[in-house]
Image (tube, coloured by chain):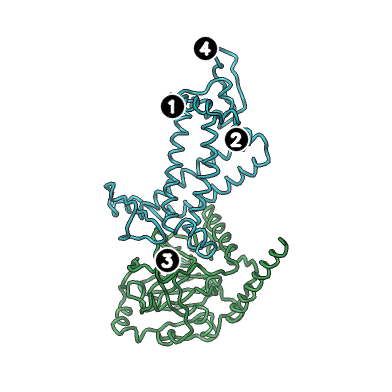
Chain colours: A cyan, B green
Amino acid sequence: MSESPKNWIYRHTINARICHWIMVLSFVYLLYSGIMIFLHFPELYWGKVGFQGYPTIFKLEDWGISWEQSEELGDRRWGRNYHYLFAWVFVINGLVYLLWNAWQKKFYRKILPTREQLSPTNFKSEMVRHLKFKAAKGEQAKQYNVLQKLSYLIVLFALFPFMIISGFAQMPAFTAISPELIDLFGGRQTARTLHVVCSLLLVVFVIVHLLEMFIAGAVNQLRGMIIGKYEIIGDEK
Amino acid sequence: MKKKSRNKVAEQSKLTRRQLMTRAGALGGLLLTGCDTQFYKPPVVRDGLMGVADTLTMASQRMLMSNQQLVQEHDVSEITPNFPVWNQSDPDDEEYQRLKAGNYEEWRLPVSGLVNNPISLSLEELKRMPSRTQTTMHICEQGWSAIAQWTGAPLLSVLQAAGGIQPEAKYIMIDAYGGWYEGYDMFDVVHPQTILAYGMNGKDLPLGNGAPLRLRVERHCGYKQLKFIKSIQVVSSVEGFGRGTGGLNSDFGFHWYAGA
């Protein structure tokens, strides 16, 4: 165990920190309002059309919550209002984050895996370390590990855009603006179903993200995301 | 090459705009310029951030629809056999029940307000007007969707039949039996697929779907597709109707603009 002089690094830039917390706020509201909307119509379908009585691919009723109970729990008026409000917060925040970072080389260094990181040996050892719930130490902790980088890339550049686009494909105005987009999904109801599936993937990401934060040290990680300072603990043996 | 294709697009949109102007001109007085910001926000913008979000949604979608492109029309084979009946299915209204009992023969559609020649049309008269048939998707704000074929008279032709609108006209308010009412701006009025439908899937409009006449204002959620139409008024302001937000749904706190 190495004692004393604390080894501080500057972990997150100001824009990453601001955008992260705005993202957290909008994600919480989007998820909650999305659930409120869903509870008012707790069935999922596949294809272009779907309604009560049409063959479903998911029914909340099968999980012991009747339509009436579910409707009581939901609030689609509140849900719709806040879903669109925070969709705008989410989109604008995301664009600010991207534009802020797109021209900065260090952003790509931070988020793109290096060739060494992508090597099978490193991949394997990271996988083992994660499965043992061990925190990264010393030099290792100074940058994102390969699994972290890949999951952030997937969330930022696959799941987030997918949420937005599958949201568009559900909007009546898009039957005029871009019916091709709705067709691309295979229909409006498929877009709705995939919107829900993708949101569940994001929830899984958030759970793992929080879990990793506790494994790596919640105080240190949170400090890093709030004021930017991050303590490097331990040395490579 | 690139320049050329861009010019072509510009030309096309100009043409569409000209057609649009002609359509609007036919109404008399109504001017629709390129990016008319009056169509970018609801008649009453809500307070705070909610109003900002409403306006962002409406403005961005209206910009993307500025060519008044048509919505996707589906093949008749895609028609949903058992189209859902949602909301009121048989208005609890004495006058409506009387008209229904008389097979809507005494039903009349008054078109009044800021029109040059107020009229009152019978169902037969509406059916004699040039009609439009479209197979489109109905999208309910709650989550469901279904496809049906609608036949009706374009709302624009009905307003033309009333002598066109006066220059200060901004919205049309439609009243329905059973207490529902809804407001629409001229952007939706001039759209070719905005029709007063008396037919559904080749037959008369069924009771549950709003007999004898309902509105099809494509590009909007189901709650804007008013059923059991009673009257049409052209107005310059939505004040004095219900709570003054421009429709019963927005009185209840839903978005006035239902394109999202």
Is residue B56 toward the left or the right of residue B256 in the image?
right
Q: Nearer the viewer, mark 2 or mark 4?
A: 2
Mark 4 and mark 3 residues within 8 Å of each other at the beta carbon? no
Q: Which mark is residue A1?
A: 4
Q: Residue at x 58, y 33 (%)?
A: A113
Regarding mark 4 in the picture, which secondary structure is present there? loop
In the image, residue A22 lies at what x, y percent?
54, 42
- The image quarter containing residue A178 is bottom right
Of callouts 2 and 4, which one flags the residue occurring earlier in the amino acid sequence? 4
Mark 2 and mark 4 residues within 8 Å of each other at the beta carbon? no
Classed neighbour count for the residue bearing mark 3: other residues with Cα under 10 Å, few (<14), some (14–19), many (≥20): many
Chain containing the residue with disc 4: A
* Callout 3 amino acid: His
Chain containing the residue with disc 3: B
Q: CA distance from mark 2 to mark 1?
A: 22 Å
Mark 1 and mark 4 residues within 8 Å of each other at the beta carbon? no
Chain containing the residue with disc 1: A
Regarding mark 2 in the picture, which secondary structure is present there? loop
Mark 4 on the same chain as mark 3: no
The residue carrying mark 1 is A131
Chain containing the residue with disc 2: A
The residue carrying mark 2 is A112
Q: Is residue A214 above or below residue B60?
A: above
Mark 2 on the same chain as mark 1: yes
